[in-house]
Image (cartoon, helix red, strand yellow):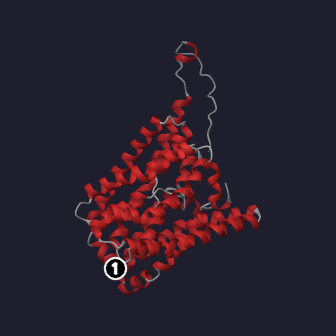
Amino acid sequence: MNMLARHPLGRLLTNAGTTILLVAAILVGALIGSISESTGADLGSGVDRTVILLVSLVFFEANLATLRHARGNLRFIAVAWVTNFVVIPSIGFLVASIVLAGKPLFFTGLVIYFMAPCTDWFLGFTRLAKGNTSLGAALIPINMVTQLLLYPVYLRIFTEWQTGVDVGGVRDTLIDWFLVPFVIAAVAHVVLERVLPARIFATIMEVTTRLIPLVIALLVLEIFAANVGTIRAHVGIFALILLGVFVFFLLTYALGERISRLFDFAYPEHALLTMTTAARNAPLMLGVTVAAIPDQPLVYAALIIGMLVEFPHLTVLTQILRRQRAATELPPPTALSGRPDAPHAPIPATNSHA
């Protein structure tokens, strides 16, 4: 474990600590905006700069070299891709349509939250669950590029008919704000990895990882400070958003279990599929949406509320998967010698990719 991970701040910026950070950002931002509208407006003027910083860090963190792990695992990659980008967005659309019918802005935000699989912290939970992290790393650039390319497509299919968003304008925004920074960040990652000593580069990557939750929290604070009045007027809908996210997580878990059995995935791939289909890429989607659909705080609020539930959910999933793994490692006592009181044989090693 490195120094940052041992530091109290490092521990706070991982797993459930991020949820606490986001809740604090919501409360502080709302308080500032309620006390002083001018201060809230000043904070809101920094949203664009914070978005650029956030997406730059997210893109820099991604490692395109991990794509080499996809070779020889094309079957799993194909199954995960179809599940993440065809099946799950359809499930998310149905859930949002039911719980947020007649509320187009919140509906749009929730659909955007549902449609993009995670490209960063899901790997940490996969590691905790003893899943295949090498293959999971290969999913990161695939998922990131795919969700950026499909963002305007999903808006057209799922939300344009309700919100009237100009999808053509969204496409131009993605090119200017995200595809170009993605290329620059990816090149910077490759160059720095080659020219810097491994230890220094690893430290830079660790700092980048720890900074991302802080920048997300800053963006959330700015959004709530600048738009607290509008958001507060609709706070009763937050319970519906949380209900929709809870139902979505239940459905995706059941889907992952079913697909893993259908394709006979070994436990490491089963755990990876469960995590990649559960975790959502709210940070990047929040940044994309703030830039592509400006001045729509209710859309952003739905994304942020969905993010609050994610870390507790992934923590619970980790425990469920670890118990499943333990159950497969322990044969029944009667299978060892035919006698219930026979001593257990040593637990066989598993082919874990943690």
Check the image and report above or below for 294 versus 205. below
**Label 1 neighbour load within 10 Å: few <14, some 14-19, many 20+:** some
Please say if 287 is above or below 255.
below
The residue nearer to you, when weighing 137 against 19, is: 137
User: Vertically, is 101 above or below 345?
Assistant: below
Q: Quadrant of residue 339?
A: top right
Which image quarter holds the C terminus?
Answer: top right
* Front-lying residue, 197 or 25: 197
Residue drawn 55% across the image and 53% down it: 139
Q: Judging from the image, what secondary structure is the residue with disc 1 in?
A: helix
Q: Among all residues in the image, which is located at the extreme left?
A: 102
Residue 5 x %, y %: 62, 58
Q: Amino acid at mark 1?
A: Ser
The N terminus lies in which quarter of the figure? bottom right
Residue 265: give x, y in percent of width and height: 52, 37
Pointer 1 residue: 34
Q: Report the front residue among 73 and 115.
A: 73
Query: Can residue 252 be seen at all in this image of the molecule?
Result: yes
The residue shown at (44%, 62%) is 150
In the picture, measured across the screen, residue 238 lies left or right of residue 341, that is: left
226 above or below 325? below
Q: Position of residue 114 (x, y in %)?
A: 39, 57
Residue 239 lies, in percent from the top left, at 29, 59
